[in-house]
Image: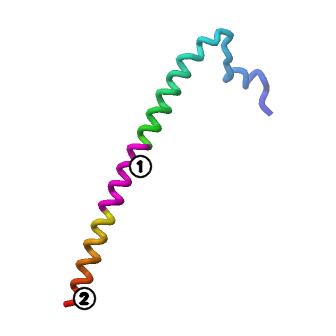
Amino acid sequence: MFDWTILSLFLYFPEDKTEYIPAAITSVIFLIAAILTMRFIMKKSKQEEEKTKALEEKMLQYSQEEKKE
């Protein structure tokens, strides 16, 4: 197993809890950016889906008209 002294090199818990504030602010900023990006991707995906459905319907109508003739 790992020796505790090796693992303790990677763990740092400051006594002054105000050192957590910049990390928390950065985490919140990235979380908000990730949420906004995901919403943007979902919105664009929905628009592309609607365009695809419209094109599919147009193609189906065209093929049905071809069969009638």
Residue 60 percent coordinates (x, y)? 29, 77
Q: Which residue lies furthest to the left in this view?
A: 69
Residue 34 lies left or right of residue 60; in this view the side is right
Circle 1: residue type: Met
| Closer to us: 6 or 69 | 69
Local SS, label 1 = helix
Does residue 4 lie above or below 62 as drawn?
above
Q: Mark 1 points at which residue?
A: 42
Query: Which residue is more in the foreground, 64 or 19?
Result: 64
Return the x and y of residue 56 as percentages of the image width and height: 31, 70
In primary-sequence order, the first of circles 2 and 1 is 1
Disc ID at residue 67: 2
The residue segment tinted magenta is 39-51
Q: Does the magenta stretch include residue 40?
A: yes
Position of residue 6 measured from the top left corner of the image (x, y, whole percent) = 73, 24
Q: Is mark 2 on a helix, strand or loop?
A: helix
